[in-house]
Structure formats: structure tokens, C-alpha cells
Image (cartoon, rainbow, N blue to C red):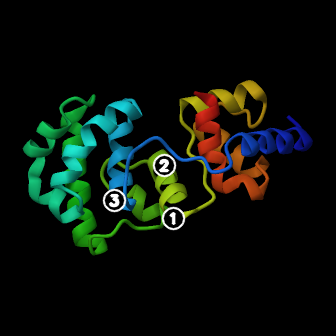
Amino acid sequence: MDAREIEAFFEALARANPAPVGELAHTDPFTLLVAVVLSAQATDAGVNKATPALFALAPTPAAMAALGVERVEALIRTIGLYRTKAKNLVALAEALVVEHGGRVPSDRAALEALPGVGRKTANVVLNTAFGEPTIAVDTHVFRLANRTGLAPGKTVREVEDGLLERVPERFLAHAHHWLILHGR
């Protein structure tokens, strides 16, 4: 795709969905972070079925840490890899309390230092919770970027870097959601 085609593509996405939102249910940066961690190797629908009970008991990092691994496991048992995710969520919550005053940090390095948080999760949180112009590359975005020629690449990072280079700045705030929704 050349620059003109990219502009037209994002214009069409913007017209079709001027204010896109992600499908994970959340109320704040912490519940978003938890939902995104749970979404790895799982569907958003499956995560959204498990999180209401979890968030009712653990709406904050301190409450999540206090639940402990076994209680979190029981609440997220329907989600794949629930044992590992429960350990990560409790450790992540403890780190947020001890290292960040119970708040989700708004910088990439601090996010990626949290248990269970990689680049894609950090990108989702930075974009959705903090308005950073980042693009999380999941399997849908990776496939779409390569098939359309929008940002071809062999690795997720190559595609992410290509998208950040080629997507017009005025579309960056919503590009992540448009691409995910379109790619699905």
C-alpha cells in the first residue's frame, strides 16, 4: 500500500466506526490490565465471562493481592492457562502495590517489568488506558498488515514498527482498535 491508499483505508475505517472500543470489559487501567493479561490464548468473550466475579472481589491491586493465587485460580478457572495467569495476576498486583503505589504505570518499561506483561499487553494498556499512540500487534493485525501490504514484516515487532511509521498520525489513537476489529 502506498501513502494514498493507507490514508484512504483509514478514512474508510474512521467513517465506519468513528469511536472504536475494545471488546474487553473494564472500568479503569487496573481492570483493563488484568483483562488483557487474561486474554492471552483466550477469547475476549471468555474473559468477559470470568472477570465480573473477579472484579467484584478484587477491583484494586491490593484486593487482588489479598485474594491469593488459589482464590484467583477458582475465579478464572474457565480461562485457558488459568494457573499461570492466577500466579501472574497476584504477583502483578503485589508489584503494583509495592512499586507503584497501587496504580498502573503509564510507561512501557514499568509495564513490561510486571509479571505476565509483554509488549502487546503494554501496548494495549498504553493505548486504551493512557491514550498513547501505540499499536498492539495480535494475530489478526499481523495477518492484516501482511496481506494488505499495510506494514509487511516477518516478526510482530517489524509489523508494529512498520505500522507506527506508515499509519498517518491523526489515525494513531484509534488505529489499534480499527485494525483488530477489521482483522477479525
On the rendered structure, is 86 left or right of 145? Answer: left
For label 1, the residue is 130
Q: What crowding class fits label 3: few (fewer than 14 Cα within 10 Å), some (14-19), or many (20 or more)?
A: many
Identify the mark at residue 119; answer none if there is no mark. Answer: 2
The mark nearer the N terminus, 1 or 2, is 2
Q: In the image, is residue 130 above or below residue 87?
A: below
Instruction: Check disc 3 and give the amino acid type.
Output: Phe
Instruction: Check disc 2 and give the amino acid type.
Output: Arg
Q: CA distance from mark 3 to mark 1?
A: 12 Å
Q: Position of residue 75 (x, y in %)?
A: 16, 40
On the rendered structure, is 148 left or right of 117? Answer: right
User: Closest to the observer: 19 or 83?
Assistant: 19
Q: Position of residue 44 (x, y in %)?
A: 40, 35
Q: CA distance from mark 1 to mark 2?
A: 15 Å
Figure label count: 3
- In the rendered image, which quarter contains the N terminus? top right
Which residue appears farthest toward the top when viewing the image? 147
Could you tell me which secondary element the residue under label 2 belongs to? helix
Instruction: Check disc 1 and give the amino acid type.
Output: Phe
Could you tell me which secondary element the residue under label 3 belongs to? helix
For label 3, the residue is 30
The mark nearer the N terminus, 3 or 1, is 3
User: Closest to the observer: 100 or 181?
Assistant: 181
> Do the CB atoms of the residues marked 1 and 2 lie less than 8 Å apart?
no
The structure residue drawn at horizontal position 35% and vertical position 46%, both measured from the top left corner, is: 35
Q: In the image, is residue 19 above or below residue 98?
A: above
User: Closest to the observer: 131 or 1?
Assistant: 131
The structure residue drawn at horizontal position 73% and vertical position 33%, both measured from the top left corner, is: 152
